[in-house]
Image (cartoon, rainbow, N blue to C red):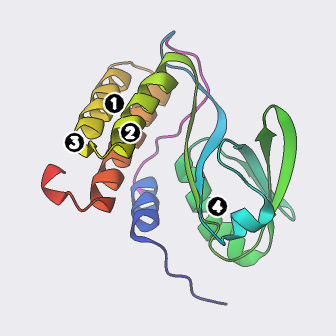
Amino acid sequence: MKLRILPFSSCWILVLFSFSSIWLNPVDSSPSIKLFPGVVIETVAKNSVAERAGIQPGDVLLNWVREDAKGQLESPFDLSLWEVEEAPLGSVTVEGLRNAERRKWILGPDAWGLHTRPNLQGAILDSYQEGKALSVAGRFNEAAEHWLQLAVEAGTSNAAQNHSLAFWLRFHVAEMLGNERLYAAI
């Protein structure tokens, strides 16, 4: 068995996931916050397994199958978990959508190279993308403030999915600031 060293952020995803019983479930508990099934691909690493398989930004991954094992992809944390647990055991078939068309991709045992987000729609997606635009423009503290405010709004609901979204947004802020080496802002 080949030992794989995970990027720092992937390790933290797994640590946080291990201590959290929070899942992003597609339950419509709030008219302003609705999560849909699957995870959306934000980036695909160059020369990665995912790039060779043909996965592209915007694709929605819904579930995975490896021989007789299978599971749903309900949160970005799921994908990291399944990559670590299932990929070393053999090729994993990931099923999803590209522009509403059903697709399948086969991912091998090396690092998949995917960065994902929850499947957001409507006003919550617009708000998330506003924060992303701030980040891309190099306005990291403003992006962090924007996403943290969104996390507070999501966390005020009694619905577990909204608490899960709040958790993911806070993690996303920490990941962004860490990648930019803005530790004092964390």
Give amino acid for label 1. Answer: Ala
Depth check, mark 3 against mark 4: the one in front is: 3
Which is nearer the N-term, disc 4 or disc 1? 4
Give amino acid for label 3. Answer: Asn
User: What residue is shown at x 70% (from left), y 51% (from top)?
Assistant: 56
Crowding near the residue tagged with mark 1, few <14, some 14–19, many ≥20 C-alpha atoms within 10 Å: many
Depth check, mark 2 against mark 3: the one in front is: 3
Q: CA distance from mark 1 to mark 3?
A: 15 Å
Tag 1 and tag 2, C-beta contact below 8 Å: yes
Give the residue pinned by disc 3: 141
User: What residue is shown at x 41% (from left), y 63% (from top)?
Assistant: 9
User: What residue is shown at x 54% (from left), y 36% (from top)?
Assistant: 24
Which is nearer the N-term, disc 2 or disc 4? 4
Asked if residue 138 lies in the magenta stretch, the reply is no
* Of the pair 158 and 152, the residue shown nearer to us: 152
Q: Which residues are magenta?
A: 19-30
Q: Decide whether the magenta segment is chiefly helix, strand or loop.
A: loop
SS for tag 1?
helix
Give the residue pinned by disc 1: 151
Give the residue pinned by disc 2: 169
Which is nearer the N-term, disc 3 or disc 4? 4
